[in-house]
Image (cartoon, rainbow, N blue to C red):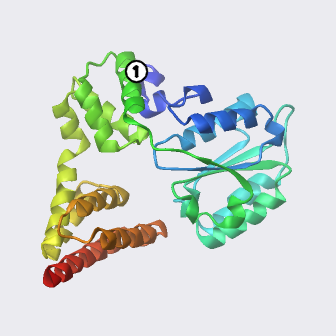
Amino acid sequence: MSTEAELMWVEKYRPRRLEDLVDQEDVKARLGALLSRPQEMPHLLFAGPPGTGKTTVAMIVARTVLGDSWRDFTLELNASDERGIDVVRERIKSFTRYVDLREGVPFKLVILDEADEMTSDAQTALRRIMEESSRVARFILTANYSSNIIEPIQSRCAVFRFVRLGEADVVSALERICRAEGCQYEGDALRMIYEYTQGDMRQAINQLQAAAALGKVTVEAVRTIAGTGRRASVREMVQAAIGGDFAGARRRLLELMRVYGMEERDILKFAFEDAMAAKDLDHAEVAKLFAEYDYRLGQGSNPELQLSALLAELSALAGRQARSS
């Protein structure tokens, strides 16, 4: 089997050119103009929801600007894993310190994925390095939440905002992959994948490949792989909390996190949708409550502890409103 065939589909079908990127027309237009004059390229900040192409575009920039030497002159770090000040001081500073630019290579490139997970001290140190190394290096930062990036860094970057992908674009991309792989599929199954992943192309392709491994991509296959049952478990968790059964709600939370490995951001998103759909809750209070815990998770607080506290407050809110009615 060829190396390409062994690749995960999310890598095999990752766009290699800016024009191949799904949607993001504003990003492609603005960035294309910058890439025509690489010597003038500033530091870049790509902000937006997961799976919308931020890291892919960062790699396209590296290939476009640095050519065949891009691997030698690019440092890629996941800031959520390596987010402390020591990483900034040691790895990044060491990489940008030594100048060995060949002909045709305008600068070194540092790509920091999930930079919004870096500590404030690390970001402050990063700002200084960005200033000191601007002659020989450029930085590309990606972030789900640009508000978690300190203002001095934002002001030194050209900011590109990525939008969540629409259903038609995602389904069309999944259809192309199915045809390329010779995989039979149902249109409703691809639409179900979109409904579950909500514009996250990376997650959608992963779900498609997992469903295809079962044979034809059918609604039943997607339901099995994509965890529709987990979506229902979130709803049951919220209903238990609203009904005053905090212990039962927390049991479902732990099952979702520990057994199924559901990400805390997905749990929060789906729980918010279900809480806002509840008729007997003050939706303004619900929105404020979820906004607070979304902020706490964004600051790196313990997800299990914070989501448990959210369920407790949701249960208390429902109890107060039931007594006042």
Res 30 → quadrant: top right
Q: Which residue is drawn at 17% across and 53% down?
A: 232
Q: Residue furthest front?
A: 325
Describe residue 296's horizontal placement relative to residue 308 as left or right.
right
User: The N terminus is located in which quarter?
Assistant: top left
Describe residue 107's horizontal placement relative to residue 316 as left or right.
right
- Could you tell me how many numbered marks the image carries? 1
Q: Circle 1 sits on which residue?
A: 176
Q: Where is residue 154 in the image (x, y as percent from the top left)?
A: 68, 59
The front one of 23 and 133 is 23
Q: Where is residue 224 in the image (x, y as percent from the top left)?
A: 18, 39
Q: Position of residue 175 (x, y in %)?
A: 36, 22
Describe residue 37's horizontal placement relative to residue 214 as left or right.
right
Res 305 → quadrant: bottom left
Q: Position of residue 148 (x, y in %)?
A: 56, 65
Mark 1 lies on a secondary structure that is helix
Q: Which residue is drawn at 65% across and 73% down?
A: 121
Q: Which residue is drawn at 24% across and 30% down?
A: 189
In this view of the protein, can residue 72 be seen by the observer?
Answer: yes
The front one of 186 and 181 is 186
Q: Residue at x 54, y 55 (%)?
A: 114
Amino acid type, callout 1: Arg
Res 182 → quadrant: top left
